[in-house]
Amino acid sequence: MAGAHEIRGRNGKRLYINADGSVPVSNNSGPLNVYLSHHRSIQWAGQFCSERFVGQVSADASTGGKVWLLNNVGSSVLVQVRQVIVSSAMPDADVNTDCRITSERITFTGTPSGTLGTAGSFDTNQSLSSSVSIRLANTGMTITPDTIVGASWLGERQASGMFNGRPGDVSISEDRDEGVVLRAGEGLVFRQADAGDVNIGYMILVRFDVFTQI
């Protein structure tokens, strides 16, 4: 088709897109399983892996947590969360608790000033926008909790020595066409939502992309 770009869907079907982004009327190759993201351009892709956290007897406060992924107020980029994995270690002592580490969307005002976490880039030629940060404390922000978008169970160790849990529990997992989107003034916090036990430890890994809007 003259003057058009061809896109192949996951099912092998073809779709033609005009140079101006419109779709020609005569697309006759059948239904497509394809997402069009021509309005976004990827700027950065990478991940953050936390230190080992120790469970708490009490749950975190509703505005508390362990790790915050933040897209600052006034930011011109989008953050898209691809995957969250919570890995818990088998405790040395018996633990009888149903404790979740939740991934929760928040909105916030102010300027984050908590300790910075270091996210690693998948491509050393890409630089993480200064509008996006990982924080290990919630100082400098006024936080409004929103919805839970993922959760992982830390598990328990019974008196018999049996461990019930998933060492690499996936809280969020999306492909490149989908994911939790954080706009300016939004973030994702990872917090212990239930009463827990100090005899269990865990780590949090979050993979995310940063997009510019064009």
Image (cartoon, rainbow, N blue to C red):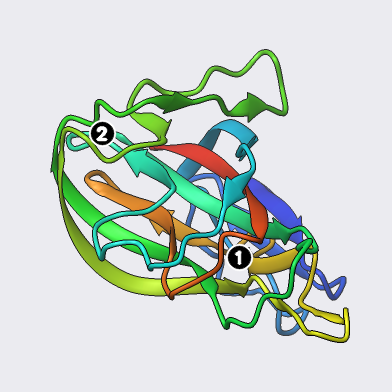
Residue 78, image x, y percentages? 39, 43
Q: Which residue appears at 61% of the width and 65% of the height? A: 35
Q: Which labelled disc corresponds to residue 125?
A: none
Are there few (<14), some (14-19), or many (20+) residues within 10 Å of tag 1? few
Depth order, front residue of 3/103? 103
Instruction: List x then y, in percent, for residue 207.
Output: 63, 46
- Depth check, front residue: 135 or 64: 64
Residue 78 lies left or right of residue 64; in this view the side is right
The residue labelled by disc 1 is 35
Residue at the image point whose x is 76% and y is 63% from the top: 91
Residue 104's image quarter?
bottom left
Q: Is residue 31 visible?
A: yes
Percent x, y of residue 50: 60, 39
Q: Secondary structure at mark 1?
A: loop
Residue drawn at x 64%, y 45% is 3
What residue sits right under mark 2 in the picture? 75
Q: Spatial distance from mark 1 to mark 2, Cα to Cα?
A: 25 Å
Q: Is residue 1 visible?
A: no
Q: Quadrant of residue 155?
A: bottom right
Q: Is residue 131 left or right of residue 126?
A: left
Which amino acid, mark 1?
Tyr
> What residue sits 39% from the left and 54% below the top?
188
Q: Are circles 1 and 2 on residues that touch, CB within 8 Å?
A: no
**Crowd band around label 2 with a 10 angstrom C-alpha radius: few (<14), some (14–19), many (20+):** some
First-in-chain label (1 vs 2): 1
Type of amino acid at the residue the image marks with label 2: Ser
